[in-house]
Amino acid sequence: MKTSFDKNKIKIVLLEGVHPVAVEEFRTAGYSMIESINTALDEKSLQSVVKDAHILGIRSKTRVTARILENSPGLLSVGCFCIGTNQVDLQAATKSGVPVFNSPFSNTRSVAELVIAHCIMLMRQIPAKNEAAHRGVWLKDSSSSFEVRGKVLGIVGYGHIGSQVSVLAESLGLQVIYYDIE
């Protein structure tokens, strides 16, 4: 007795610009019915797109409501390509037998790099110099611009992102202190 669908009959819908690597991975795994949409959809549009889908991949803007789940009888799973799952009605998903998963580590390194980049930009006073340059003023003076090396960085919350910020900061020569409730 056959208990699963042929991969070429499984419709996958990816919203909000889920990275093209996800599409490649699905194709490499043998799936061919993949629809990729670069934006989030309102409930009515989402309902239309998902009504015959089997797998739904979203990020954080799309709201998967009880109505969406009730009107998508073939939906097998919802993947949230982000930290949380609060954009999905989890009670309705459980009632419908649709597992919901997320990818809590997917953006950790990107966020940590952004934090470090902001630290460097603030220490070098880039925002003020950029604003001045847009007014036609060239602030070439570096008297109040500093390197991050040798400075102390305080991190409140030492979870996935905080610990990655620490790794990057220490590799740049910062001393790291942190506070975490754990």
Image (tube, helix red, strand yellow):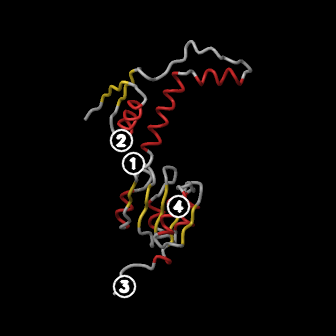
Q: Earlier in the sequence, mark 1 or mark 4?
A: 4
Q: Residues within 10 Å of mark 4 (few under 14, many from 20)?
A: many
| 121 displayed left or right of 181 | right
Residue ID for mark 3? 2
Q: Residue 115: image x %, image y %? A: 47, 33
Residue ID for mark 2? 160
**Contact, mark 3 vs mark 2 (Cβ under 8 Å):** no
Q: Nearer the viewer, mark 1 or mark 4?
A: 1
Cα gap from disc 1 to disc 4, whole angstroms: 19 Å
Cα gap from disc 1 to disc 3, whole angstroms: 35 Å
Q: Nearer the viewer, mark 4 or mark 2?
A: 2
Q: Residue 129: image x %, image y %? A: 63, 21
Q: Earlier in the sequence, mark 3 or mark 4?
A: 3
Q: Is 182 situated above or below 122? A: below
Q: Earlier in the sequence, mark 1 or mark 2?
A: 1
Q: Amino acid at mark 4?
A: Leu
Q: Residues within 10 Å of mark 3 (few under 14, many from 20)?
A: few
Q: Amino acid at mark 2?
A: His
Cα gap from disc 1 to disc 2, whole angstroms: 7 Å
| 172 displayed left or right of 118 | left
Residue plotted at (44% across, 67% down): 70
Cα gap from disc 4 to disc 2, whole angstroms: 26 Å
Q: Is 52 situated above or below 172? A: below
Residue plotted at (59% across, 54% down): 39
Q: Residue 146: image x %, image y %? A: 51, 18
**Contact, mark 1 vs mark 2 (Cβ under 8 Å):** yes
Residue ID for mark 4? 14
Considering the numbered disc 3 on the image, is that residue within a helix, a strand or a loop? loop
